[in-house]
Image: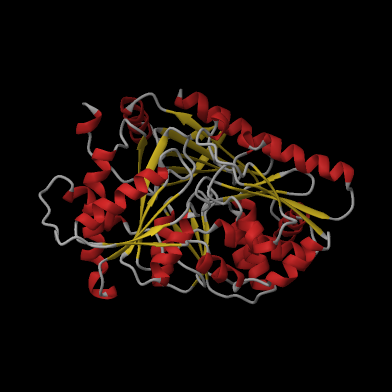
Amino acid sequence: MPVANRPIKFGTDGWRGVIGDEFTFERVALVAPVAAQVLLNTYGEMVGNRTIIVGHDRRFMAEDFAQFVAQIVTDAGFDVVLTEAFAPTPAFSWAAKAQNALGALVITASHNPGKYLGLKVKSCFGGSVPSEVTKEIESLLTQEVSLNREKGKIESFDPWHSYTQGLEGKVNIAKIRDAISSGKLTLFTDAMHGASAGGLGMLLGDKVQEINSNRDPLFEGGAPEPLPKYISKFIDVIKNHRKANPEGLSVGLVFDGDCDRIAAVDGNGNFLSSQILIPILIDHLTQRREFTGEIVKTVSGSDLIPLVAKLHNLDLYETPVGYKYIADRMLDAKVLLGGEESGGIGYGSHIPERDALLSALYVLEAIVESGMDLGDYYSHLQKEVNFNSAYDRIDLPLSGMEVRERLLQQLQKEPLKEIAGKKVVDCKTIDGYKFRLDDDSWLMIRFSGTEPVLRLYCEASTLDDVHKTLNWAKNWAE
């Protein structure tokens, strides 16, 4: 089927495609006015206006597509508030809520490789729209939609000012600034050539040591995803700093392409994913900030998360993979924190959106107020709940839909009873297949909702066990 005739599908976080192939001006011209109309249908009565925020990241032609979206949407009778510059996706979610808009249309492909671009649709609440909204957008793309043709107007805005002011009010910003300016804490950041560039410097001053802050639409031939394979140079920077400065606290913070995902590197150069950061943040926010509320995790989240939640007498709620499910829960319950394995963490006291800059500030606050290196903090937590956790994930590219269908049928017709020599004792199918093994480790097999990839997740007591299980799963899939 020619690309132009393929249906446009929204995954776990928006619609994405290869630039000039699936993601074109012609197809964006179809999607943008329909998305605006569905936002009006859903939230119009609530907000009482026809205003849409339009934003973008730093990808190839992102600002061109954003300007095009603004024009198309105003032609359809909506007023547009168009960003003056790139900014984190959560800054546009913040703007949607702060400016009482219908929502936001953000041109970004998040952590995908440089050949991709996409569109995220955000609600008036400042978070991802629920599945019903994206399904309605998809269905209306195949129908004639009656749009108001009285042309709207375009205004521009600075996406950083109100957003950073809001972030400053969430943490003890003076204490963090003092620790960095005095040299008690050395902060390194990796913008991965994405939309976080300059953000922490704006908040914390010129002592922040940022790398990869320049624009590079090719992302050095990789992807702007906070994973060890993409940040080896950054890890070396931190290891070299420790050799030269064996005393004192240091940390590295890494942000994805649109700054809604985060990972960290401790002072010794060890990579810490959100599977580690989430338990640390739960402990810090309850113990020192005295926050309360439910903890929301996706099914791929670490077993350490419920253990630390239980330690602080917090309820736990589990969702499928995709932050939109966490955002839905944030609108329905009092949530302290919601987080996902891929680096997205959000807070009930903020907006129902993953926000990597706010997570960075909370991580820094945890280091400064505890006086502990992040790695030491993690070890302390594991001892406190008597649980050793090692985790990894591998992504296998799929050559076509037939491979996906074959593997799905295989899982359905021949359920796995043994994995890497261990018996399967339970299987969750809330999203993909999560197999609990007889040594209490787990393997999860799931197809990505945003790209043609099979994801394999595993948590066990040692990294050696994790890699053995993942290698077994890789051989099974191939």
Give the left or right position of residue 426, taking residue 50 as reference. Answer: right
> In the image shown, does 284 or 412 lie closer to the viewer?
284
**Colour setup of the view:** secondary structure
> In the image shown, does 467 or 38 lie closer to the viewer?
38
Give the left or right position of residue 467, taking residue 478 as reference. Answer: right
Residue 327 is drawn in which quadrant? bottom left
Q: Is residue 293 above or below residue 390?
A: below
Q: How many marks?
A: 0
Give the left or right position of residue 83, taking residue 338 as reference. Answer: left
Q: Quadrant for the N terminus, please.
A: top left
Where residue 228 appears, as percent x and y from the top left, is 64, 38
Residue 466 appearing in the image: no
- Residue at image x 72%, y 54%? 208
Where residue 405 appears, as percent x and y from the top left, is 32, 30
> In the image shown, does 311 or 276 lie closer to the viewer?
276
- Residue at image x 41%, y 44%? 62
- Residue at image x 89%, y 53%? 247
Where residue 282 appears, as percent x and y from the top left, is 62, 65
